[in-house]
Image (cartoon, rainbow, N blue to C red):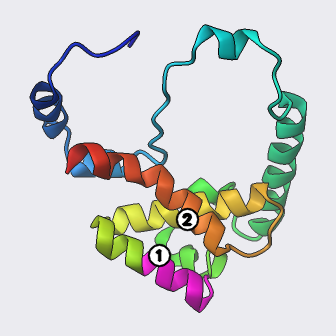
Amino acid sequence: MVGESKSSPREIQNYLGRISGPLLDRIDLHVEVPQVKFREISGDRTGEASAEIRKRVIAARQHQQKRFAHKPKITCNARIGPKELKEFCALDDTTKELLKMAMTELNFSARAYDRILKVARTIADLAGSENILSEHISEAIQYRSLDRQLWT
């Protein structure tokens, strides 16, 4: 979609209302990407270099392969089943309480809970953290929040 929407807020809400919650629950990351202004993309870039990001992704994937070496059907965090969530996505009490509060306040489904844990596990892996910390859960929750802003 290019440019601003010409639809009214009511038309947008009616359209979005047609998309079911169970369908949205199957999408791991919901991210709003604003239009980038020309001056921002044509200027000097100061973000992280792609080569550095690639190194972190490769390291995270290698760590996942080691983690799941004894589980032949699991090759990455996205493949963790409900039974394995407790083993591979353990949370301390503070982090668990944060997730509980988000689940209640944002009315997330059980499927969203599983997906938040898997995304948080990946965020922790990218950060080089053995444990899922509160900041990893918070970031994963943010990736689920867009649907709650638009579809409720």
Residue 99 belongs to magenta span: yes
Q: Which sits earlier in the primary sequence, circle 1 or circle 2?
A: 1
Q: Is residue 29 above or below residue 80?
A: above
Say what amino acid the circle numbered 2 marks: Ser
Residue 124 belongs to magenta span: no
Q: Residue at x 83, y 62 (%)?
A: 128
Q: Is residue 28 above or below residue 81?
A: above
Between 6 and 147, which is closer to the camera in this rendering?
6
Task: Report the side of 105 relative to 10 (left or right).
Answer: right
- The crowding category of the residue bearing disc 1, from other C-alpha atoms within 10 Å (few below 14, some 14 to 19, many at least 20), is many
In the picture of the structure, the residue carrying the numbered disc 1 is: 99
In the picture of the structure, the residue carrying the numbered disc 2 is: 138
The N terminus, quarter of image: top left
Task: Report the side of 130 relative to 85 (left or right).
Answer: right
- Separation (CA) of disc 1 from disc 2: 8 Å
Q: Position of residue 123 (x, y in %)?
A: 68, 57
Dots 1, 2 in contact, CB < 8 A: no
Say what amino acid the circle numbered 1 marks: Leu
- The crowding category of the residue bearing disc 2, from other C-alpha atoms within 10 Å (few below 14, some 14 to 19, many at least 20), is some
Q: Quadrant of residue 121?
A: bottom right
**Magenta residues, as a range?**
91-100
The main secondary structure of the magenta stretch is helix
Q: What label does residue 121 carry, if any?
A: none
Q: Is residue 66 above or below residue 144?
A: below
